[in-house]
Image: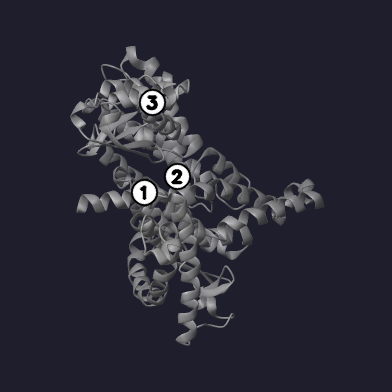
Amino acid sequence: MFSRFKDQVQVFGRSLLLPIGIMAPVGMLVGLMGAFTQSYMIEQLPFLGNETLQLIFSSVQSISNVIFGNIPVLFAMGVAYGMAKNEKGISVFASIISYLTLLITMNVYLNATGTLASEEVMSEVGQGFVLGIQTLRIDAAGGIIAGLLAAKLTDKFYRQQLPLAFAFFAGKKFVLILAFLLTIPIGLLVPVVWGVFTTILVWISPVIMNQPWGPGIYTFLDRALIPLGLHHVLSAAVRFTEVGGTYVIDGESYIGILNAMNEILFELGPDHEAWTDILPTISPYLAPWQMVRNLFRVPAIGLAMYHTAYGKNKKVAGGIILTVVLTAVLGNVTEPIEFSFMFISPILYGVYIVLSGLGTVLLTVFPVAMGYIRGTIFDFVIFGLLYENTNWYNILIVGVLNFVVFYFAFRYLIIKFNIKTPGREEQVQDATLLNDKRYDRIAELVVEGLGGRENITNVDNCVSRLRIDLKDNKVVNKEKLQESGAAGIFFPKKNHIHVVYGPHVEFVRNEVDDYIVGKNRG
Protein backbone atom coordinates (compact mmCIF):
# COMPACT_ATOMS: atom_id res chain seq x y z
CA MET A 1 0.00 0.00 0.00
CA PHE A 2 2.83 2.39 0.88
CA SER A 3 4.54 1.62 -2.44
CA ARG A 4 1.34 2.42 -4.33
CA PHE A 5 0.91 5.67 -2.39
CA LYS A 6 4.52 6.63 -3.16
CA ASP A 7 3.94 5.95 -6.85
CA GLN A 8 0.86 8.17 -6.85
CA VAL A 9 2.75 10.98 -5.15
CA GLN A 10 5.51 10.66 -7.76
CA VAL A 11 2.96 10.94 -10.57
CA PHE A 12 1.44 13.94 -8.82
CA GLY A 13 4.85 15.58 -8.53
CA ARG A 14 5.46 15.06 -12.25
CA SER A 15 2.06 16.53 -13.11
CA LEU A 16 3.13 19.80 -11.49
CA LEU A 17 5.82 20.13 -14.15
CA LEU A 18 3.18 20.97 -16.75
CA PRO A 19 2.07 24.32 -15.25
CA ILE A 20 5.58 25.06 -14.04
CA GLY A 21 6.85 24.36 -17.57
CA ILE A 22 4.82 27.23 -18.99
CA MET A 23 5.41 29.53 -16.03
CA ALA A 24 9.19 29.39 -16.38
CA PRO A 25 9.61 30.72 -19.95
CA VAL A 26 6.69 33.14 -19.63
CA GLY A 27 8.20 34.34 -16.37
CA MET A 28 11.39 35.17 -18.23
CA LEU A 29 9.34 37.13 -20.77
CA VAL A 30 7.41 38.97 -18.06
CA GLY A 31 10.67 39.73 -16.29
CA LEU A 32 12.31 41.09 -19.42
CA MET A 33 9.29 43.23 -20.36
CA GLY A 34 8.93 44.37 -16.76
CA ALA A 35 12.56 45.46 -16.68
CA PHE A 36 12.20 47.43 -19.91
CA THR A 37 9.12 49.31 -18.64
CA GLN A 38 10.58 50.29 -15.27
CA SER A 39 11.54 53.95 -14.93
CA TYR A 40 15.02 53.14 -13.63
CA MET A 41 15.78 51.09 -16.75
CA ILE A 42 14.54 53.86 -19.03
CA GLU A 43 16.79 56.33 -17.23
CA GLN A 44 19.80 54.12 -17.97
CA LEU A 45 18.76 53.32 -21.55
CA PRO A 46 16.79 56.35 -22.82
CA PHE A 47 15.86 54.72 -26.14
CA LEU A 48 13.58 52.38 -24.19
CA GLY A 49 11.35 55.38 -23.48
CA ASN A 50 10.11 55.40 -27.06
CA GLU A 51 6.29 55.32 -26.94
CA THR A 52 6.00 52.55 -29.50
CA LEU A 53 8.51 50.37 -27.69
CA GLN A 54 6.80 51.01 -24.36
CA LEU A 55 3.45 50.05 -25.89
CA ILE A 56 4.95 46.80 -27.18
CA PHE A 57 6.65 46.03 -23.87
CA SER A 58 3.60 46.76 -21.74
CA SER A 59 1.32 44.83 -24.11
CA VAL A 60 3.53 41.76 -24.08
CA GLN A 61 3.76 42.00 -20.29
CA SER A 62 -0.04 42.24 -19.95
CA ILE A 63 -0.55 39.26 -22.23
CA SER A 64 2.07 37.24 -20.37
CA ASN A 65 0.60 38.12 -16.98
CA VAL A 66 -2.51 36.13 -17.84
CA ILE A 67 -0.49 33.01 -17.01
CA PHE A 68 0.30 34.19 -13.49
CA GLY A 69 -3.21 35.51 -12.96
CA ASN A 70 -4.61 32.05 -13.58
CA ILE A 71 -2.15 29.74 -11.84
CA PRO A 72 -4.93 27.69 -10.17
CA VAL A 73 -6.48 26.99 -13.57
CA LEU A 74 -3.11 25.82 -14.88
CA PHE A 75 -2.69 23.54 -11.88
CA ALA A 76 -6.20 22.12 -12.31
CA MET A 77 -5.52 21.21 -15.93
CA GLY A 78 -1.95 20.05 -15.32
CA VAL A 79 -2.82 17.78 -12.40
CA ALA A 80 -5.87 16.37 -14.21
CA TYR A 81 -3.81 15.58 -17.29
CA GLY A 82 -0.89 14.15 -15.37
CA MET A 83 -2.87 12.02 -12.92
CA ALA A 84 -5.50 10.58 -15.26
CA LYS A 85 -4.61 7.25 -16.84
CA ASN A 86 -7.47 7.29 -19.35
CA GLU A 87 -9.21 9.95 -21.42
CA LYS A 88 -6.90 12.76 -20.35
CA GLY A 89 -8.81 15.30 -22.43
CA ILE A 90 -12.04 14.61 -20.57
CA SER A 91 -10.14 14.80 -17.30
CA VAL A 92 -8.88 18.29 -18.16
CA PHE A 93 -12.41 19.37 -19.17
CA ALA A 94 -13.80 18.01 -15.91
CA SER A 95 -11.13 19.82 -13.90
CA ILE A 96 -12.28 23.20 -15.21
CA ILE A 97 -15.90 22.39 -14.39
CA SER A 98 -14.83 21.33 -10.92
CA TYR A 99 -12.69 24.42 -10.33
CA LEU A 100 -15.43 26.86 -11.39
CA THR A 101 -17.91 25.02 -9.18
CA LEU A 102 -15.47 25.14 -6.28
CA LEU A 103 -15.11 28.93 -6.59
CA ILE A 104 -18.81 29.68 -6.60
CA THR A 105 -19.59 27.14 -3.86
CA MET A 106 -17.08 28.77 -1.52
CA ASN A 107 -18.66 32.13 -2.41
CA VAL A 108 -22.08 30.74 -1.42
CA TYR A 109 -20.63 29.43 1.87
CA LEU A 110 -19.08 32.80 2.71
CA ASN A 111 -22.38 34.54 1.93
CA ALA A 112 -24.43 32.07 3.97
CA THR A 113 -22.15 32.33 7.00
CA GLY A 114 -21.91 36.10 6.84
CA THR A 115 -18.15 36.00 6.34
CA LEU A 116 -18.00 37.48 2.84
CA ALA A 117 -15.67 40.43 3.37
CA SER A 118 -15.91 43.88 1.82
CA GLU A 119 -13.53 44.68 -1.01
CA GLU A 120 -11.53 46.98 1.26
CA VAL A 121 -10.54 44.23 3.72
CA MET A 122 -11.05 40.99 1.81
CA SER A 123 -7.32 40.50 1.15
CA GLU A 124 -6.65 40.68 4.89
CA VAL A 125 -8.90 37.65 5.53
CA GLY A 126 -7.68 35.57 2.60
CA GLN A 127 -10.45 36.43 0.15
CA GLY A 128 -10.29 37.88 -3.34
CA PHE A 129 -11.74 37.91 -6.83
CA VAL A 130 -10.91 34.83 -8.90
CA LEU A 131 -12.34 34.69 -12.42
CA GLY A 132 -14.81 37.38 -11.37
CA ILE A 133 -16.00 35.54 -8.25
CA GLN A 134 -15.23 36.76 -4.75
CA THR A 135 -14.14 33.66 -2.91
CA LEU A 136 -11.63 32.17 -0.53
CA ARG A 137 -8.10 32.56 -1.96
CA ILE A 138 -6.82 29.02 -1.73
CA ASP A 139 -4.81 29.71 -4.88
CA ALA A 140 -3.01 26.71 -6.41
CA ALA A 141 -4.55 24.33 -3.86
CA GLY A 142 -7.97 24.92 -5.42
CA GLY A 143 -6.67 23.92 -8.82
CA ILE A 144 -4.95 20.86 -7.38
CA ILE A 145 -8.17 19.74 -5.64
CA ALA A 146 -10.13 20.12 -8.87
CA GLY A 147 -7.45 18.32 -10.89
CA LEU A 148 -7.22 15.36 -8.53
CA LEU A 149 -11.00 14.96 -8.38
CA ALA A 150 -11.31 15.16 -12.16
CA ALA A 151 -8.57 12.58 -12.74
CA LYS A 152 -10.08 10.14 -10.25
CA LEU A 153 -13.59 10.48 -11.65
CA THR A 154 -12.38 10.11 -15.21
CA ASP A 155 -10.49 6.89 -14.58
CA LYS A 156 -13.38 5.36 -12.65
CA PHE A 157 -16.44 6.47 -14.59
CA TYR A 158 -15.51 7.28 -18.19
CA ARG A 159 -17.13 4.01 -19.31
CA GLN A 160 -20.03 4.15 -16.84
CA GLN A 161 -23.30 2.81 -18.24
CA LEU A 162 -26.73 4.15 -17.21
CA PRO A 163 -30.30 2.97 -17.75
CA LEU A 164 -31.47 3.42 -21.33
CA ALA A 165 -33.57 6.48 -20.50
CA PHE A 166 -30.42 8.25 -19.29
CA ALA A 167 -27.99 6.71 -21.77
CA PHE A 168 -27.17 10.13 -23.28
CA PHE A 169 -25.59 11.14 -19.97
CA ALA A 170 -23.45 8.03 -19.59
CA GLY A 171 -19.71 7.59 -20.08
CA LYS A 172 -17.70 10.76 -20.51
CA LYS A 173 -20.67 13.07 -19.90
CA PHE A 174 -21.27 11.27 -16.62
CA VAL A 175 -17.77 12.25 -15.54
CA LEU A 176 -18.53 15.93 -16.14
CA ILE A 177 -21.81 15.72 -14.23
CA LEU A 178 -20.12 14.05 -11.28
CA ALA A 179 -17.33 16.63 -11.31
CA PHE A 180 -19.97 19.33 -10.87
CA LEU A 181 -22.06 17.54 -8.23
CA LEU A 182 -19.22 16.20 -6.08
CA THR A 183 -17.40 19.52 -6.02
CA ILE A 184 -20.32 21.18 -4.23
CA PRO A 185 -19.85 19.38 -0.88
CA ILE A 186 -16.10 19.81 -1.27
CA GLY A 187 -16.59 23.54 -1.74
CA LEU A 188 -18.67 23.69 1.44
CA LEU A 189 -16.09 21.71 3.38
CA VAL A 190 -12.94 23.45 2.13
CA PRO A 191 -13.43 26.72 4.08
CA VAL A 192 -13.66 24.72 7.32
CA VAL A 193 -10.74 22.43 6.57
CA TRP A 194 -8.69 25.27 5.13
CA GLY A 195 -8.77 27.08 8.43
CA VAL A 196 -7.26 24.06 10.21
CA PHE A 197 -4.86 23.35 7.35
CA THR A 198 -3.66 26.94 7.31
CA THR A 199 -2.87 26.73 11.01
CA ILE A 200 -0.77 23.60 10.49
CA LEU A 201 1.09 25.09 7.52
CA VAL A 202 1.81 28.26 9.42
CA TRP A 203 3.21 26.08 12.21
CA ILE A 204 5.51 24.20 9.79
CA SER A 205 6.54 27.31 7.92
CA PRO A 206 9.04 28.66 10.50
CA VAL A 207 11.17 25.51 10.12
CA ILE A 208 11.60 25.84 6.36
CA MET A 209 11.49 29.65 6.31
CA ASN A 210 13.85 30.02 9.27
CA GLN A 211 16.68 32.51 8.84
CA PRO A 212 19.51 31.87 8.24
CA TRP A 213 19.10 28.07 8.07
CA GLY A 214 15.80 27.85 6.24
CA PRO A 215 17.14 28.09 2.67
CA GLY A 216 19.68 25.38 3.51
CA ILE A 217 17.00 23.10 4.99
CA TYR A 218 14.84 23.66 1.91
CA THR A 219 17.71 22.90 -0.50
CA PHE A 220 18.69 19.80 1.48
CA LEU A 221 15.12 18.46 1.35
CA ASP A 222 14.75 19.36 -2.32
CA ARG A 223 17.82 17.37 -3.36
CA ALA A 224 17.08 14.54 -0.91
CA LEU A 225 13.65 14.05 -2.49
CA ILE A 226 15.03 13.82 -6.04
CA PRO A 227 15.32 9.98 -5.98
CA LEU A 228 11.66 9.72 -4.96
CA GLY A 229 10.50 12.34 -7.43
CA LEU A 230 8.85 14.34 -4.64
CA HIS A 231 10.88 17.53 -4.88
CA HIS A 232 8.22 19.13 -7.09
CA VAL A 233 5.67 18.71 -4.32
CA LEU A 234 7.94 20.47 -1.83
CA SER A 235 8.69 23.38 -4.15
CA ALA A 236 5.01 23.83 -5.03
CA ALA A 237 4.07 23.97 -1.34
CA VAL A 238 6.69 26.62 -0.58
CA ARG A 239 5.90 28.63 -3.67
CA PHE A 240 2.13 28.67 -3.51
CA THR A 241 0.93 27.91 0.04
CA GLU A 242 1.35 29.11 3.62
CA VAL A 243 4.39 26.83 3.95
CA GLY A 244 6.28 29.61 2.17
CA GLY A 245 4.80 32.23 4.48
CA THR A 246 2.34 35.08 4.07
CA TYR A 247 3.67 38.51 3.08
CA VAL A 248 1.87 41.82 3.52
CA ILE A 249 2.82 44.31 0.82
CA ASP A 250 1.08 47.69 0.70
CA GLY A 251 -1.70 46.31 2.88
CA GLU A 252 -2.39 43.24 0.74
CA SER A 253 -1.49 39.69 1.72
CA TYR A 254 0.39 37.36 -0.61
CA ILE A 255 0.48 33.64 0.17
CA GLY A 256 3.64 31.74 -0.77
CA ILE A 257 7.00 33.07 -1.87
CA LEU A 258 6.23 33.08 -5.60
CA ASN A 259 3.10 35.21 -5.28
CA ALA A 260 5.08 37.74 -3.22
CA MET A 261 7.97 37.54 -5.71
CA ASN A 262 5.65 38.24 -8.67
CA GLU A 263 4.24 41.36 -7.03
CA ILE A 264 7.62 42.78 -6.03
CA LEU A 265 9.51 41.81 -9.17
CA PHE A 266 6.96 42.59 -11.87
CA GLU A 267 4.80 45.32 -10.33
CA LEU A 268 6.68 47.30 -7.68
CA GLY A 269 10.31 47.29 -8.82
CA PRO A 270 13.65 47.97 -7.08
CA ASP A 271 12.61 51.33 -5.61
CA HIS A 272 9.90 49.84 -3.41
CA GLU A 273 10.76 49.05 0.20
CA ALA A 274 9.64 45.44 -0.25
CA TRP A 275 12.56 44.97 -2.66
CA THR A 276 15.02 45.33 0.20
CA ASP A 277 12.82 44.11 3.07
CA ILE A 278 11.26 40.95 1.59
CA LEU A 279 13.00 39.97 -1.64
CA PRO A 280 16.39 39.02 -0.09
CA THR A 281 14.54 36.69 2.30
CA ILE A 282 12.59 34.76 -0.34
CA SER A 283 15.14 34.87 -3.19
CA PRO A 284 17.27 31.95 -1.85
CA TYR A 285 14.25 29.64 -2.24
CA LEU A 286 13.83 30.42 -5.93
CA ALA A 287 16.26 31.08 -8.78
CA PRO A 288 19.41 32.16 -6.87
CA TRP A 289 20.07 28.82 -5.18
CA GLN A 290 19.52 27.11 -8.51
CA MET A 291 21.93 29.54 -10.16
CA VAL A 292 24.57 28.58 -7.62
CA ARG A 293 23.83 24.92 -8.32
CA ASN A 294 23.67 25.09 -12.11
CA LEU A 295 26.40 27.63 -12.80
CA PHE A 296 28.92 26.56 -10.15
CA ARG A 297 28.19 23.29 -8.33
CA VAL A 298 27.39 21.23 -11.41
CA PRO A 299 30.44 22.49 -13.38
CA ALA A 300 32.61 21.79 -10.31
CA ILE A 301 31.27 18.23 -10.09
CA GLY A 302 31.75 17.78 -13.82
CA LEU A 303 35.33 19.02 -13.65
CA ALA A 304 36.08 16.70 -10.72
CA MET A 305 34.65 13.77 -12.69
CA TYR A 306 36.70 14.66 -15.74
CA HIS A 307 39.94 15.03 -13.78
CA THR A 308 39.40 11.68 -12.05
CA ALA A 309 38.46 9.82 -15.25
CA TYR A 310 40.96 7.30 -16.56
CA GLY A 311 43.21 8.71 -19.26
CA LYS A 312 41.96 6.35 -21.97
CA ASN A 313 38.37 7.34 -21.23
CA LYS A 314 38.76 11.11 -20.96
CA LYS A 315 37.72 11.87 -24.52
CA VAL A 316 34.42 10.03 -24.39
CA ALA A 317 33.81 10.91 -20.73
CA GLY A 318 34.53 14.56 -21.47
CA GLY A 319 31.77 14.68 -24.08
CA ILE A 320 29.28 13.08 -21.71
CA ILE A 321 30.20 15.34 -18.81
CA LEU A 322 30.11 18.49 -20.95
CA THR A 323 26.63 17.56 -22.19
CA VAL A 324 25.15 17.07 -18.73
CA VAL A 325 26.84 20.24 -17.43
CA LEU A 326 25.45 22.32 -20.29
CA THR A 327 22.04 20.76 -19.70
CA ALA A 328 22.09 22.28 -16.22
CA VAL A 329 23.64 25.61 -17.21
CA LEU A 330 21.32 26.21 -20.15
CA GLY A 331 18.23 24.20 -19.25
CA ASN A 332 18.06 23.99 -15.43
CA VAL A 333 17.98 20.17 -15.60
CA THR A 334 20.42 18.58 -13.16
CA GLU A 335 19.13 15.03 -12.92
CA PRO A 336 21.46 13.62 -15.61
CA ILE A 337 24.58 14.49 -13.63
CA GLU A 338 22.97 13.66 -10.28
CA PHE A 339 21.92 10.24 -11.49
CA SER A 340 25.44 9.61 -12.70
CA PHE A 341 26.50 9.11 -9.07
CA MET A 342 23.31 8.97 -7.00
CA PHE A 343 22.82 5.22 -7.01
CA ILE A 344 26.35 4.03 -7.53
CA SER A 345 27.46 5.87 -4.40
CA PRO A 346 24.86 6.83 -1.77
CA ILE A 347 27.74 8.22 0.30
CA LEU A 348 28.67 10.66 -2.45
CA TYR A 349 25.05 11.69 -2.94
CA GLY A 350 24.64 12.13 0.81
CA VAL A 351 27.63 14.47 0.86
CA TYR A 352 26.18 16.24 -2.16
CA ILE A 353 22.83 17.06 -0.52
CA VAL A 354 24.46 18.11 2.76
CA LEU A 355 26.92 20.41 1.00
CA SER A 356 24.07 21.76 -1.15
CA GLY A 357 22.16 22.75 1.97
CA LEU A 358 25.17 24.33 3.64
CA GLY A 359 26.19 26.08 0.42
CA THR A 360 22.77 27.68 0.07
CA VAL A 361 22.94 29.11 3.58
CA LEU A 362 25.68 31.39 2.24
CA LEU A 363 22.96 33.27 0.33
CA THR A 364 21.77 34.59 3.67
CA VAL A 365 25.30 35.80 4.44
CA PHE A 366 25.73 37.29 0.96
CA PRO A 367 22.08 38.24 0.19
CA VAL A 368 20.65 38.78 -3.26
CA ALA A 369 17.37 40.25 -4.45
CA MET A 370 16.68 38.27 -7.61
CA GLY A 371 13.97 36.21 -9.34
CA TYR A 372 12.82 33.93 -10.85
CA ILE A 373 12.08 30.16 -10.64
CA ARG A 374 14.88 28.85 -12.85
CA GLY A 375 18.62 29.13 -12.44
CA THR A 376 19.98 29.16 -15.97
CA ILE A 377 22.57 31.53 -17.34
CA PHE A 378 19.74 33.36 -19.14
CA ASP A 379 17.87 33.95 -15.88
CA PHE A 380 21.03 35.30 -14.30
CA VAL A 381 21.38 37.87 -17.08
CA ILE A 382 17.70 38.86 -17.16
CA PHE A 383 16.88 38.94 -13.46
CA GLY A 384 20.35 39.75 -12.16
CA LEU A 385 22.14 42.05 -14.56
CA LEU A 386 19.14 43.85 -16.08
CA TYR A 387 17.65 44.87 -12.74
CA GLU A 388 19.05 47.32 -10.21
CA ASN A 389 19.71 46.53 -6.56
CA THR A 390 19.96 42.77 -7.09
CA ASN A 391 23.41 42.28 -5.55
CA TRP A 392 24.05 39.88 -8.43
CA TYR A 393 27.76 39.84 -7.62
CA ASN A 394 26.95 37.89 -4.44
CA ILE A 395 25.88 35.01 -6.67
CA LEU A 396 29.43 34.99 -8.00
CA ILE A 397 30.94 35.10 -4.50
CA VAL A 398 28.73 32.30 -3.19
CA GLY A 399 29.15 30.42 -6.46
CA VAL A 400 32.94 30.48 -6.38
CA LEU A 401 32.97 29.27 -2.76
CA ASN A 402 30.60 26.44 -3.72
CA PHE A 403 32.69 25.59 -6.76
CA VAL A 404 35.87 25.17 -4.71
CA VAL A 405 34.19 23.07 -2.00
CA PHE A 406 32.30 20.81 -4.40
CA TYR A 407 35.28 20.29 -6.70
CA PHE A 408 37.70 19.19 -4.01
CA ALA A 409 35.09 17.21 -2.06
CA PHE A 410 34.03 15.24 -5.14
CA ARG A 411 37.56 14.73 -6.39
CA TYR A 412 38.66 13.40 -3.00
CA LEU A 413 35.66 11.09 -2.50
CA ILE A 414 35.71 9.70 -6.06
CA ILE A 415 39.33 8.67 -5.68
CA LYS A 416 39.06 7.63 -2.03
CA PHE A 417 36.15 5.24 -2.61
CA ASN A 418 36.96 4.42 -6.25
CA ILE A 419 33.51 5.56 -7.34
CA LYS A 420 32.66 4.61 -10.91
CA THR A 421 31.66 8.03 -12.16
CA PRO A 422 31.76 8.66 -15.95
CA GLY A 423 35.19 7.75 -17.27
CA ARG A 424 36.07 5.42 -14.39
CA GLU A 425 34.16 2.37 -15.60
CA GLU A 426 35.50 -0.33 -17.86
CA GLN A 427 33.13 0.65 -20.62
CA VAL A 428 32.09 4.27 -21.08
CA GLN A 429 28.59 5.28 -22.14
CA ASP A 430 28.51 6.42 -25.75
CA ALA A 431 26.18 9.37 -26.30
CA THR A 432 26.64 9.39 -30.07
CA LEU A 433 23.07 8.30 -30.81
CA LEU A 434 21.66 11.02 -28.56
CA ASN A 435 23.92 13.69 -30.00
CA ASP A 436 22.94 12.64 -33.53
CA LYS A 437 19.25 12.55 -32.47
CA ARG A 438 18.81 9.02 -33.78
CA TYR A 439 15.81 8.47 -31.56
CA ASP A 440 14.42 5.68 -33.73
CA ARG A 441 17.54 3.58 -33.18
CA ILE A 442 17.55 4.47 -29.48
CA ALA A 443 13.95 3.28 -29.18
CA GLU A 444 14.85 0.00 -30.84
CA LEU A 445 17.69 -0.55 -28.37
CA VAL A 446 15.49 0.43 -25.42
CA VAL A 447 12.74 -2.02 -26.31
CA GLU A 448 15.26 -4.79 -26.99
CA GLY A 449 17.13 -3.99 -23.77
CA LEU A 450 13.91 -4.22 -21.78
CA GLY A 451 13.09 -7.67 -23.06
CA GLY A 452 10.96 -6.79 -26.06
CA ARG A 453 7.47 -5.36 -26.54
CA GLU A 454 5.81 -8.21 -24.70
CA ASN A 455 7.77 -7.45 -21.52
CA ILE A 456 6.71 -3.78 -21.37
CA THR A 457 3.40 -3.01 -19.68
CA ASN A 458 3.55 0.78 -19.41
CA VAL A 459 5.80 3.61 -20.62
CA ASP A 460 5.92 7.02 -18.96
CA ASN A 461 8.47 9.77 -18.55
CA CYS A 462 9.30 12.74 -16.37
CA VAL A 463 11.63 15.62 -17.15
CA SER A 464 14.71 13.46 -17.64
CA ARG A 465 13.81 9.77 -17.20
CA LEU A 466 11.85 7.04 -18.89
CA ARG A 467 9.72 5.30 -16.24
CA ILE A 468 8.74 1.87 -17.48
CA ASP A 469 6.76 -0.98 -15.92
CA LEU A 470 7.93 -4.47 -16.85
CA LYS A 471 6.58 -7.99 -16.51
CA ASP A 472 9.98 -9.40 -15.65
CA ASN A 473 13.00 -7.34 -14.64
CA LYS A 474 15.37 -10.30 -14.93
CA VAL A 475 15.44 -10.11 -18.72
CA VAL A 476 16.68 -6.50 -18.81
CA ASN A 477 19.89 -6.10 -20.81
CA LYS A 478 21.73 -3.12 -19.31
CA GLU A 479 24.40 -3.23 -22.01
CA LYS A 480 21.74 -2.56 -24.65
CA LEU A 481 20.40 0.36 -22.64
CA GLN A 482 23.88 1.79 -22.20
CA GLU A 483 24.46 1.42 -25.92
CA SER A 484 21.36 3.57 -26.48
CA GLY A 485 23.03 6.44 -24.60
CA ALA A 486 21.35 6.10 -21.20
CA ALA A 487 23.04 8.21 -18.54
CA GLY A 488 21.66 6.06 -15.73
CA ILE A 489 19.72 2.85 -15.17
CA PHE A 490 18.11 1.79 -11.91
CA PHE A 491 15.17 -0.08 -10.39
CA PRO A 492 13.35 2.00 -7.74
CA LYS A 493 11.20 -1.08 -7.17
CA LYS A 494 10.73 -4.54 -8.63
CA ASN A 495 9.63 -4.60 -12.27
CA HIS A 496 9.81 -0.80 -12.57
CA ILE A 497 12.86 0.72 -14.24
CA HIS A 498 14.08 4.28 -14.72
CA VAL A 499 16.34 5.04 -17.70
CA VAL A 500 17.91 8.52 -17.75
CA TYR A 501 18.21 10.46 -21.03
CA GLY A 502 18.16 14.03 -19.78
CA PRO A 503 16.49 16.61 -22.08
CA HIS A 504 16.20 14.01 -24.86
CA VAL A 505 13.75 11.92 -22.85
CA GLU A 506 10.48 13.15 -24.39
CA PHE A 507 11.71 12.44 -27.92
CA VAL A 508 12.99 9.03 -26.86
CA ARG A 509 9.66 8.25 -25.19
CA ASN A 510 7.71 9.21 -28.35
CA GLU A 511 9.86 6.89 -30.47
CA VAL A 512 9.55 4.08 -27.90
CA ASP A 513 5.75 4.42 -28.03
CA ASP A 514 5.84 4.28 -31.82
CA TYR A 515 8.23 1.33 -31.86
CA ILE A 516 6.07 -0.68 -29.48
CA VAL A 517 3.06 -0.35 -31.79
CA GLY A 518 5.23 -0.93 -34.85
CA LYS A 519 5.01 2.53 -36.44
CA ASN A 520 8.72 2.92 -37.09
CA ARG A 521 9.16 -0.51 -38.57
CA GLY A 522 7.32 0.31 -41.74
Residue at mark 3 = 443
Query: First in sequence: mark 2 or mark 3?
Result: 2
Q: Nearer the viewer, mark 1 or mark 3?
A: 1
Label 2 crowd bin: few (<14), some (14–19), many (20+), radius 10 Å: many
Q: Is residue 147 left or right of residue 352?
A: right
Residue type beneath disc 2? Gln
Q: Nearer the viewer, residue 247 or 428?
A: 428
Residue type beneath disc 1? Lys
Q: Say above or below: 521 vs 349.
A: above
- Residue positioned most to the front: 164
Q: Which mark is residue 85?
A: 1
Q: Secondary structure at mark 3?
A: helix
Q: Nearer the viewer, mark 2 or mark 1?
A: 1
Residue 153 % position (x, y): 37, 60
Q: Secondary structure at mark 2?
A: helix
Q: Which mark is residue 194?
A: none
What residue lies at 40% left-to-right and 39% top-to-bottom? 402
Q: Secondary structure at mark 1?
A: loop
Query: First in sequence: mark 2 or mark 1?
Result: 1
Indicate the quadrant where residue 201 lies: bottom left
Label 3 crowd bin: few (<14), some (14–19), many (20+), radius 10 Å: many
What residue lies at 49% left-to-right and 64% top-to-bottom? 97
Residue at mark 2 = 290
Residue 290 % position (x, y): 45, 44
Label 1 crowd bin: few (<14), some (14–19), many (20+), radius 10 Å: some
Q: Is residue 235 left or right of residue 488?
A: right
Residue type beneath disc 3? Ala
Q: Say above or below: 82 vs 467.
A: below
Residue 304 % position (x, y): 35, 27
